[in-house]
Image (cartoon, rainbow, N blue to C red):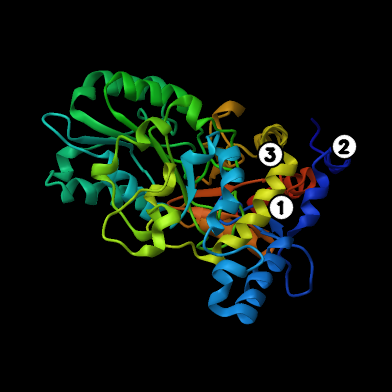
């Protein structure tokens, strides 16, 4: 790899995935110039086809009214079924183990209602220190809901002093020490702040050896990393669809329930009418007859206008395939790391250096005065760069392989170097 524009453009020219960029709407400035968008870890770009699919649903609503539930181009009653194959592919699950529904935290609460069953000594929940706040709020409230003391019932495992990463060995050691007190482990596929990717098979195995339920938050993993939830034997997983799945702000989320748990959990599952079997749902009978598979956890009918853009994105993933995307992702982040090295110690990479231990996000600490990092971010924004900030001093950058180029990475490196020269302290 060479830190030159010529090299970057040559890599782009040779990229078999390069035409997928044309199928996304790239944000522009007031003069119509494309911005440098490196924020897919927060909100993925809009697939161009999403507009057509949403317009089609609006047209069917205008044309059919309530009849659209059965007569729309894609009838609305079974609409979620259109998403199943794509989500099963990206999560490494069987079709009956996944369902598109709700939002991530709602789905997390539904999963915890089924799988967090404190009993005897086994009452605690293990998460990573610095977990995404919504996850922590959810598990803390579930502990309190079950009458547990949050201060003693929540184990938050932190990296060793001086490190930003948390090793799988440390997770295994914690489970060996405290496993008989832990009812459930909730772990991310990729840590949202540092971008560290975890060996999920290893974590699930360690949780099960300790007798714990293994749940996963895949908000920063699905569409970013190859997954194998069924093979790795996770008990459940949840995700959102607005980051790497490119389904738009507030898009419909999803969840996975391993097939071995589907028939074992009816007594602890919260029910709603869309979780009722489709054949008898509209009889409105008092007896609940569960739908097959993970669909039994549905509560309400799907939000059609939120789900339609996900169809457009899943089609792109089916065409591009996650394995080539992962290969390109590794190449993009490796190139970005190469460009960051000459900027050290003015920047510090807190994402693991090993490509297998990160997704397509690199998190960059800006040392110095408390306000320096934010000034760097603001100046990058003035130069047309869209990335984001995590307190107190971290800029997160994600070259997404579906729509970002090596030239984007090179340009970011040049602009960051320029800004660091301008803002020395």
Q: Nearer the viewer, mark 2 or mark 3?
A: 2
Say which of 117 and 96 sits in front. 96
The residue where tag 1 is placed is 415
Q: Earlier in the sequence, mark 2 or mark 1?
A: 2
Q: Is residue 422 visible?
A: no
Q: Are marks 2 and 1 in contact (CB under 8 Å)?
A: no
The residue located at (52%, 62%) in the rendering is: 77
Residue 53, compared with residue 158, is above or below; it is below
Secondary element at tag 1: helix
Residues under numbered marks 2 and 3 in contact, where contact means CB atoms less than 8 Å apart:
no
In the picture of the structure, the residue carrying the numbered disc 3 is 336
In the image, 387 versus 153, the foreground residue is 153
Determine crowd level at label 2: few under 14, some 14-19, many 20+ residues with C-alpha closer than 10 A: few
Instruction: Please say if the residues under marks 1 and 3 sit with CB atoms less than 8 Å apart.
Output: no
Return the x and y of residue 344 as percentages of the image width and height.
Answer: 61, 37
Residue identifier under label 2:
14
Considering only order in the chain, which callout, 3 or 1, is on the residue closer to the N terminus?
A: 3
């Amino acid at each position: 790899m060479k830190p030159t524009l010529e090299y970057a453009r040559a890599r782009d020219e040779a990229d078999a995935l390069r035409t997928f960029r044309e199928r996304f709407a790239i944000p522009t400035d007031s003069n119509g110039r494309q911005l440098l968008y490196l924020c897919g870890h927060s909100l993925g770009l809009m697939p161009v086809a999403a507009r057509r699919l949403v317009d089609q649903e609006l047209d069917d609503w205008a044309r059919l009214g309530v009849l659209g539930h059965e007569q729309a181009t894609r009838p609305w009653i079974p609409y979620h079924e259109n998403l199943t194959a794509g989500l099963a592919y990206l999560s490494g699950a069987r079709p009956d183990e996944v369902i598109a529904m709700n939002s991530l935290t709602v789905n997390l609460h539904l999963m915890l209602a089924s799988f967090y069953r404190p009993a005897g000594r086994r009452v605690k929940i293990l998460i990573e220190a610095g977990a995404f706040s919504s996850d922590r709020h959810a598990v803390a409230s579930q502990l309190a809901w079950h009458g547990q003391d949050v201060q003693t019932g929540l184990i938050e495992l932190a990296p060793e002093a001086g490190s930003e990463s948390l090793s799988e060995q440390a997770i295994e050691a914690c489970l060996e020490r405290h496993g008989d007190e832990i009812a459930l482990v909730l772990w991310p596929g990729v840590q949202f702040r540092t971008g560290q990717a975890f060996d999920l098979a290893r974590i699930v195995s360690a949780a099960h050896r300790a007798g714990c339920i293994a749940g996963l938050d895949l908000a920063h993993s699905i569409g970013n990393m190859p997954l194998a939830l069924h093979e790795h034997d996770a008990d459940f997983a949840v995700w959102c669809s607005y980051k790497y799945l490119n389904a738009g702000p507030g898009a419909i989320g999803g969840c996975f329930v391993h097939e071995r748990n589907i028939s074992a959990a009816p007594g602890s599952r919260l029910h709603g009418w869309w979780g009722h079997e489709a054949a008898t749902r509209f009889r409105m009978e008092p007896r609940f007859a569960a739908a097959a598979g993970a669909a039994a956890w549905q509560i309400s009918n799907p939000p059609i206008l939120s789900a339609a853009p996900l169809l457009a994105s899943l089609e792109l993933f089916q065409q591009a395939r996650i394995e080539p995307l992962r290969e390109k992702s590794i190449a993009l982040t490796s190139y970005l790391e190469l460009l960051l090295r000459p900027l050290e110690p003015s920047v510090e990479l807190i994402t693991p250096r090993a490509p297998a231990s990160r997704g397509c996000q690199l998190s960059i600490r800006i040392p110095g005065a408390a306000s320096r990092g934010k000034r760097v971010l603001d100046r990058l924004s003035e130069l047309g760069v869209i990335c984001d900030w995590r307190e107190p001093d971290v800029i997160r950058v994600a070259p997404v392989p579906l729509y970002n180029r090596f030239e984007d990475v090179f340009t970011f490196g040049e602009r960051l170097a320029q800004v660091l020269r301008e803002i020395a302290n």
